[in-house]
Image: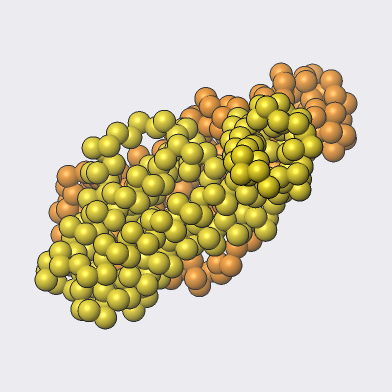
Chain colours: A yellow, B orange
């Protein structure tokens, strides 16, 4: 095969994904046709079908793109907390990164799209739930269990502690963004304040004593 | 006017609202026609237009129905907390009621519908945000400010404390319900456990000393 062919095919694949993302986000899944996706991607309709069996397959490939983002954050959080020597400082770092990742306009928009289509595609929504927020919560729960074993946190329910951490950090800005759009009124310093306040509440409940060993 | 006419008109008004709710929730706003609403409500299309100027007006009347629910909860929470003599017990009661109200299938479904249509109807979504979750948070913040003045809570940011309370209580089951449907895996005893755990975390951070004065 001509190497340029592979490159060109990859380029078309990417163009189709980007065009479909733009259209699904602006018009919704149901009101977007494969013709429109092909036109925006500047490829033929048959090329869309060659790359993606059908519109639903294209949809799932797009929304599952957040999986890589979630896995990246979960892995970074685990690295930060694994050998922490200053739990408050490091939890603040995790909280700030968590907000930075989740409050990205593209993540917010995809999240909204999946919620909107959850009745039409229950399996896809469930997969998303398990592999994006669910995966992050599982990883955080595992970190908190390790921290409890090291005597830095006190909890018999690390999975519950993980949900408390997550919703203390994300709840308010994420909920507001769901209704009021992804260019919400939150600036970086406000997000930092939310992150630090969340960690203060979390540690008041879960720290064993002085969280700086 | 014949009194029966008013009754009949009210009955039709209610039937139209119910039919539209059913259709919007199952098919989405865009894919529901006024013809279908009229057929399901067993009235003529002109009757729909007589009661509601257009489909959008009907939509806003439905989704703003959650306002009364939110106001009822906020008022009950204020009554419970106003003269509390056992803050832990009473916050648990508020947390349990909060979950019971928000996790109702109809509330969950309307919430999802508004998030889905937030791009199409940004003003409606913003109004909903302000008058449903926003109103509840404002009321809780006001309660927490009073409790701080009574020396039962310590906070300089009662509005932030209200968001912490709300998301400690609601975050996990509400998020799961957004993706996995409103008949989620949460039973009453699990919701009680979540409510009580949320209050424990909240009071660890915000109680002045012993929260039972």
- Judged left or right of residue B64, residue A32 is right
- Can I make out residue A186 in this image? yes
Instruction: Tell me which corner region of the image, top left, top right, bottom left or bottom right, holds residue B37.
Output: top right
Of B59 and A65, nearer the camera is: A65
- Judged left or right of residue B133, residue B68 is right
Query: Which residue lies at the image location 66% right of the left edge and 43% below the top edge?
Result: A2
- Judged left or right of residue B37, residue B132 is left
Expressed as whole percent of the image width and height from the top left, the position of residue A70 reads: 45, 55
Of A1 and A24, nearer the camera is: A1
Of B198 and A73, nearer the camera is: A73
- Residue at the front extreme, as displayed: A2
Expressed as whole percent of the image width and height from the top left, the position of residue B100 reads: 52, 58
Of B47 and A97, nearer the camera is: A97
Instruction: Tell me which corner region of the image, top left, top right, bottom left or bottom right, holds residue B181.
Output: bottom right
Query: Which residue lies at the image location 52% right of the left edge and 39% below the top edge?
Result: A109
Query: Which residue lies at the image location 39% right of the left edge and 47% below the top edge?
Result: A101
């Amino acid at each position: 095969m001509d190497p340029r062919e592979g490159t060109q095919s990859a380029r078309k694949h990417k163009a189709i994904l980007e065009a479909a993302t733009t259209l699904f986000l602006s018009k919704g899944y149901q009101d977007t046709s494969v013709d429109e996706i092909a036109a925006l991607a500047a490829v033929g309709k048959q090329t869309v079908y060659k790359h993606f069996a059908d519109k639903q397959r294209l949809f799932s490939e797009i929304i599952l793109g957040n999986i890589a983002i979630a896995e990246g954050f979960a892995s970074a959080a685990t690295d930060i907390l694994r050998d922490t020597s200053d739990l408050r400082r490091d939890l603040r770092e995790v909280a700030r990164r968590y907000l930075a990742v989740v409050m990205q306009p593209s993540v917010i928009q995809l999240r909204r799209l999946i919620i909107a289509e959850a009745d039409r595609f229950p399996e896809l929504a469930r997969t998303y739930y398990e592999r994006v927020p669910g995966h992050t919560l599982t990883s955080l729960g595992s970190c908190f269990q390790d921290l409890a074993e090291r005597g830095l946190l006190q909890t018999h329910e690390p999975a519950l502690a993980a949900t408390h951490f997550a919703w203390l950090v994300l709840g308010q800005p994420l909920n507001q963004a769901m209704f009021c759009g992804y260019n919400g009124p939150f600036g970086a310093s406000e997000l930092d304040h939310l992150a630090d306040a969340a960690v203060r509440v979390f540690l008041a409940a879960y720290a064993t004593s002085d969280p700086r060993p």
